[in-house]
């Protein structure tokens, strides 16, 4: 049996003799082979990583890109930008279906639409409207209902046919009101939905935690909301509605296109969340990141201050 040292000795002899070149050639060949094998593994691997990276980036880009952010210098410009999108739609499709919101945010927008209607630049004669929500348990003509709001801030100043205006009913049999409004929305696809946003990211009366798959439904108002609303009801908690009827997030996302408006620093966090691209059930407006159509987020400088 050859000892280990003997074998090494033989190899040494060979290396120092004629076999040296051959051995080096062999080494080179082996290293070429292993380099080749490395190439076969590394190149496809790097390609895969690159393709994966591109796909990932495109996906993120697409997700954020479907929201068009329009930052305006102030409330008036925000209102004008939203009004332009709506009036362009009405000119292009005089029989369009508009989803409307209440609250302080769209008041400037409604004033511009009223002016354009007065100047006969647009007509609401064949436009149908669909409001997001309504309080329950107070009569329709109560001064704080969204029914009254719409009449006082828009409908009584424009040429809309009141038969074409739809606001969910908060009086009477609530369950059948829910079914009826859902039916109405099913039959009438909204072409453009206007939204305001709550500080906590709510849209319509869909508070944090609302399932994105919900259609029209009844909401129990949160204590904080009830207390906040007391100022509109003689500061008497007992007079404040405890329930509301609202389009669900699913109904909102069914609209072809959506405009979300926000002004003021108190909406900056909510807007930052929407624009971050996350989709979070605890921030209802982030559902807009899943919308298939066009979403315009039109904000003033203050609401954009955290972007
Ligand atoms: C109104 C509505 C609400 C408001 C939101 C913001 O119909 O559904 O979601 O859009 O509470 O209210 P404002 O505009 O008063 O800040």
Image (cartoon, rainbow, N blue to C red):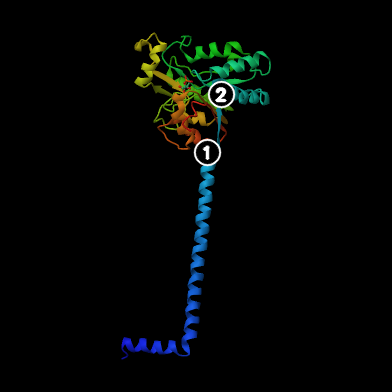
Q: Quadrant of the N terminus?
A: bottom left
Q: Is mark 1 within 8 Å of ligand 1?
A: no
Residue 53: image location, x then y, percent: 51, 51
Secondary structure of the residue carrying tag 1 is helix
Secondary structure of the residue carrying tag 2 is helix
Location of residue 227 (image quadrant): top left
For the question of whether residue 190 can be seen, the reply is no
For the question of whether residue 153 can be seen, the reply is yes
Residue 265: image location, x then y, percent: 46, 25
On residue 162, which mark appears? none
Mark 2 lies on residue: 78
- Residue at 53 percent across and 20 percent down: it is 106
- Residue at 68 percent across and 14 percent down: it is 119
- Residue at 60 percent across and 11 percent down: it is 157
Q: CA distance from mark 2 to mark 1?
A: 20 Å
On residue 64, which mark appears? 1
Residue 149: image location, x then y, percent: 51, 13
Location of residue 224 (image quadrant): top left
């Amino acid at each position: 049996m050859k000892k280990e040292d003997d074998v090494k000795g033989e190899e040494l002899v060979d290396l120092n003799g004629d076999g040296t070149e051959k051995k080096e050639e062999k080494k080179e060949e082996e290293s070429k082979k292993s380099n080749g094998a490395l190439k076969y593994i590394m190149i496809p691997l790097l390609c895969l990583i690159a393709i994966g990276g591109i796909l990932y980036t495109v996906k993120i880009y697409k997700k954020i890109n479907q929201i068009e952010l329009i930052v305006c210098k102030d409330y008036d410009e925000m209102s004008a930008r939203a009004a332009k999108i709506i009036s362009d739609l009405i000119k292009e499709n005089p029989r369009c279906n508009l989803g409307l919101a209440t609250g302080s945010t769209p008041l400037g927008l409604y004033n511009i639409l009223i002016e354009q209607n007065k100047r006969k630049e647009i007509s609401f004669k064949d436009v149908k409207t669909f409001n997001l929500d309504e309080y329950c348990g107070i009569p329709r003509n109560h001064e704080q209902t969204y029914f009254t709001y719409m009449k006082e801030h828009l409908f009584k100043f424009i040429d809309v046919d009141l038969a074409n205006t739809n606001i969910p009913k908060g009086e009477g049999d609530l369950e059948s009101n829910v079914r009826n409004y859902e039916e109405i929305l099913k039959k009438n696809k909204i072409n453009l939905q206007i939204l305001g946003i709550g500080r906590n990211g709510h849209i319509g009366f869909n508070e944090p935690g609302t399932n994105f798959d919900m259609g029209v439904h009844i909401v129990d108002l949160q204590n904080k909301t009830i207390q906040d609303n007391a100022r509109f009801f003689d500061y008497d908690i007992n007079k404040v509605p405890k329930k509301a009827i609202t389009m669900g997030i699913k109904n909102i996302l069914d609209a072809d296109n959506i405009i979300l408006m926000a002004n003021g620093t108190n909406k900056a966090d909510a807007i930052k969340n929407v624009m971050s691209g996350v989709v979070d059930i605890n921030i209802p407006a982030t559902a807009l990141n899943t919308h298939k159509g066009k979403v315009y987020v039109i904000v003033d400088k203050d609401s954009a201050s955290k972007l």
